[in-house]
Amino acid sequence: MLDLLLRQELSSFEGRYYHLREAPSRPAPVQAPRPPLLLAAFGPRMLRTVARHADAWNAFGKPEEMRERNQLLDHYCTELGRDPNSLTRSLYCWAVGPHDDPWASVQAFHDVIGPYLEAGINQFLIDQPRDDQLATLERVATEVLPALRAAGADERELLPTQPGRSATWSRPSDYV
């Protein structure tokens, strides 16, 4: 229903729980056909919803957890006939302590995001640096990110079967 509202000026919809009759949606989004739909998800049910409806997925967790969720997303995309590479994979990241602060140095930035890049994450939402770390942000923005973009992301390797852990999924240790 949201997809309809964002793609058309007037939308009608008859669903199990919701009904629309010529519902207007103005002003139209600047992005065409609509802004990207980003859904956050951790468990199998919501990851299936992400595979079906989202343009981008967001979560947080350790690299191993993100890799497992990525594999499950790949499986669900394949089941639905969707190219897994068509789904942006994003991580929300914040510094809990000095050992995992991506803004401590350019090397720290590489150390923090490197394992996530290897786990299949291709977009990062990182809390802003402190005022005394703005020089690192500037270097990352002008040197590191252009180099990463130029290198590009590898195509996802598809698994032939469903990942084994999906049936025994448990909440990540930092789940709120």
Image (cartoon, grey):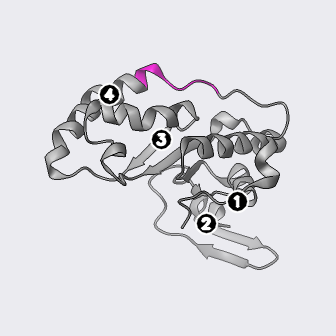
Graded by Cα atoms within 10 Å as few (under 14), some (14 to 19) or many (20 or more), the crowding at tag 2 reads: many
State which tag comes first along the sequence, 1 or 4. 1
State which tag comes first along the sequence, 2 or 1. 2
State which tag comes first along the sequence, 3 or 4. 3
Q: Disc 2 and disc 4: Cα gap in Å? A: 38 Å
Residue sitting nearer the eye, 137 or 27: 137
Hey, what amino acid is under mark 1?
Answer: Met
Which residue in the protein does label 4 denote?
Answer: 144
Residue 123 is marked as 3
Q: x, y percentage for residue 117? A: 51, 33
Graded by Cα atoms within 10 Å as few (under 14), some (14 to 19) or many (20 or more), the crowding at tag 4 reads: some
Q: Disc 3 and disc 4: Cα gap in Å? A: 14 Å
The quadrant in which residue 156 appears is top right
Secondary structure, mark 1, is: helix
Graded by Cα atoms within 10 Å as few (under 14), some (14 to 19) or many (20 or more), the crowding at tag 3 reads: some
Look at discs 3 and 2 and give the one toward the viewer: 3
> Is 154 in the magenta?
yes
Q: x, y percentage for residue 73? A: 71, 45
- Vertical side of 144 occupied by 26: above or below: below
Of all residues shown, which one is farthest toward the left?
A: 132
Residue sitting nearer the eye, 110 or 84: 110
Residue sitting nearer the eye, 64 or 83: 64
Circles 3, 4 touching at the beta carbon (< 8 Å): no
Q: Residue at x 46, y 66 (%)?
A: 27
Circles 2, 4 touching at the beta carbon (< 8 Å): no
Q: x, y percentage for residue 109? A: 34, 36
Q: Disc 1 and disc 3: Cα gap in Å? A: 19 Å
Range of residues picked out in magenta: 149-155
